[in-house]
Amino acid sequence: MHTPPDSPFSAEFSPEIHFGGPDQMPGHLRNVLEAHIAAVPAGGTIDWVTYYFRDLRLADALIQAKKRGVRVTLCLEGRPRIPHANDAVITGLSGPDGLDDALRIITLPGIPSPSNKSWKPQLHEKLYCFSHPQPVAFIGSFNPSGNMLQEDPAILQEIGDQDRGYNALFGLIDPVLVDGLVKHARQLYQSPPGLWYRFSARASHDIQGTDTIIHFWPRLSSHPVIQFLRGISSNARVRIAASHIRTKSAVDVMINLAQRGVTLEIFAESTHRRVTPEVEQRLASAGIRFRRILNSEKLPMHLKFVLIEDGNRVWSIFGSFNWTQPSFWLNHEIAAISSNPLVFQILAERWNILRNESGIAAR
């Protein structure tokens, strides 16, 4: 089993974790990012990689940071699922009064595919790095995809209100992880990935910190989360919070865990497009405790984390990855596997909040 190093736990490197959800003020996570932008002085650096970016106030905060002498780089997906979603921010950030050449729109080349299919990789990472007041690199599930200044109901219907929905940002402060993630963001900015990127050493490079390992996709080697889960014992307990579960291979792994005797629980998004009824039926038929998060305001459950207890050891897995074919094989994703017990405790407390939410339907 590929595990994080067994170095002694150090609270010094415990992440700065923030959650969004109905129990938080609307826009809490975007406010966290805005506060970090404001805290970077002239001579500092901000390096972002994100999928959706529609928050005009945050875009302006980045522009103001650049004007006061902060070095800014922003890599933004040029072809998200809703193609025009990022247009207003791109317009505002482009040109001499915006970020100018600090903005990089990345459209990844398609993978050769059968005539009846279109395999289009996407930059699905969520990465926000700041040099001050303490170097930190945020990863997780949150895109600044809301626009409180002028919300588009059609886009909100498709994406969901991520400024109020269930999300997380994990602010990693281990210098090894921060340095590696900043380097990753700047490499994407300087040399956008090409068609054969997945075959390069750069794609398969992992970052190993004190108690956490960062993995990147796309990669030719085995899916690190699947590889990890296959290595746990039959006496383990696994809890999965998932916004998307669609691919058969992921469901097969989960069912195999249950068949081996692993206690498996899943909290999933309520939308059938993201987690299909067929997936739900297969998991429930295997004896897996499956619940959809059904908030009364229909807020999206966009969390992506796994909790593992095996004997006297615990791990947390979190990042941008989904349990879907594009996420497994095509998209650019980030995941962390951590043996930090404080991270596990914080996520376990969040799990309990999800479990106690009114409107959760079980089957």
Image: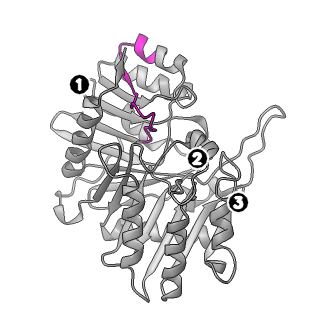
Q: Residues within 10 Å of mark 2 (few under 14, many from 20)?
A: few
Tell me the kind of residue under disc 1: Asn
The label shown at residue 194 is: 3
Instruction: Locate residue 271, reporting x and y percent.
Output: 52, 29
Tell me the kind of residue under disc 3: Gly
Q: Are marks 3 and 2 in contact (CB under 8 Å)?
A: no
Cα distance between the residues tagged 2 and 1: 30 Å
Q: Are marks 1 and 3 in contact (CB under 8 Å)?
A: no
Which of 141/264 is in front?
Answer: 141
Region of the chain picked out in magenta, as a range: 282-302
Q: In the rendered view, would you say 112 is above or below 266?
A: below
Q: Residues within 10 Å of mark 3 (few under 14, many from 20)?
A: few
- Residue that label 1 marks: 235
Tell me the kind of residue under disc 2: Leu
Q: Residue at x 64, y 43 (%)?
A: 154
Q: Residue at x 68, y 60 (%)?
A: 87
The label shown at residue 220 is: 2
Q: Where, quadrant-wise, is the C terminus in this rendering?
A: top left
Does the image show residue 245? yes
Label 3 element class: loop
Residue reaching furthest to the right = 115
Instruction: Locate residue 186, reporting x and y percent.
Output: 54, 72
Tally the marks.
Answer: 3
Give the mark nearest the N terminus, 3 or 2: 3
Question: To which quarter of the image does residue 269 belong?
Answer: top left
